[in-house]
Amino acid sequence: MPRLRLRRPRGPAELVSAAVVALAVLVLAIRTATVAAGALIQAWPALLALALLAAAVAVWRIRQAAAVRRWDRERLAALRITLSEFDAMDDRSFEYALRDLLVRDGWPARRVGGGGDQAADVIGDHPQRGRIVVQAKHTRVGGKVESKVMYAVNGTAGPVHKADHAVVVTNGAFTRDAMAWGDRHGVHWVDREKLRRWSENGTALHELLSLPARSRTSRFKRAA
């Protein structure tokens, strides 16, 4: 494409013509700016009202979000669940209750239980303490969790879920073999008494179980 080149005016006539064109362009620009300024002056009350409305809506949304977060914090901070309430739950409700207790303790957690959960019903991720995998075992009063549950959790906590900590929680009890096997292999267990201290007394789970901060040498991470 040929480049457009401007030729300098030659002679008085061309200079006068160029000056007239420049003056016309300047006048047009001034008139356009004047019209725009006039329109802006006439419209400024409406524009100001719109700006104030937008600011008010933004402030309202921020306050609403803050209020919701504050309400959630207060609700979770005051969360207490009795053993009788646990006993009345079904399996799904039990899992959600454990999730809420973890959130109360500062573990952003989610329920993942269901078909194919691979021995994990709740997973929480803590910025300092790493990932916790919880297997929930809701039983009838007097029911006991056997060693095979501990085996399953131990087998998937690291390879599947990349966990730093693995815990089995029940509203019942554990067999002696299950507790002993869990203690030997680093699978924590929360029986009815520990659950009461966690849910009713408000003791944080990581304090109850003395869970350490996240470590690169986590047993489950090494196993993975």
Image (cartoon, rainbow, N blue to C red):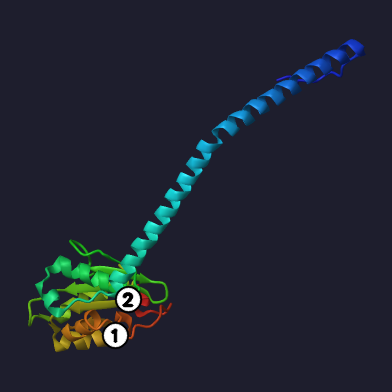
Q: Residue furthest right?
A: 11
- The quarter of the picture where the C terminus appears is bottom left
Query: Is 207 situated left or right of 8 in this image?
Result: left
Q: Quadrant of residue 22 in the image?
A: top right
Q: Dot 1 surroundings within 10 Å: few (below 14), some, or many (20 or more)? A: some
Q: Dot 2 surroundings within 10 Å: few (below 14), some, or many (20 or more)? A: some
| Vertical relation: 79 (above or below) 67 | below
- The quarter of the picture where the N terminus appears is top right
What is the distance, in whole Å, between disc 1 and disc 2 at their CAs?
11 Å
Q: Which mark is residue 81?
A: none
The residue tagged 2 is 105
Q: Residue furthest top?
A: 13
Mark closest to the chain's N terminus, 1 or 2: 2
Residue nearest the observer in this picture, 165 or 63: 63
Q: Which mark is residue 208?
A: 1
Residue drawn at x 13%, y 86% is: 175
Specify whether residue 209 is in view. Answer: no
Residue 174 location in percent, x, y? 15, 84
Residue nearest the observer in this picture, 218 or 26: 26
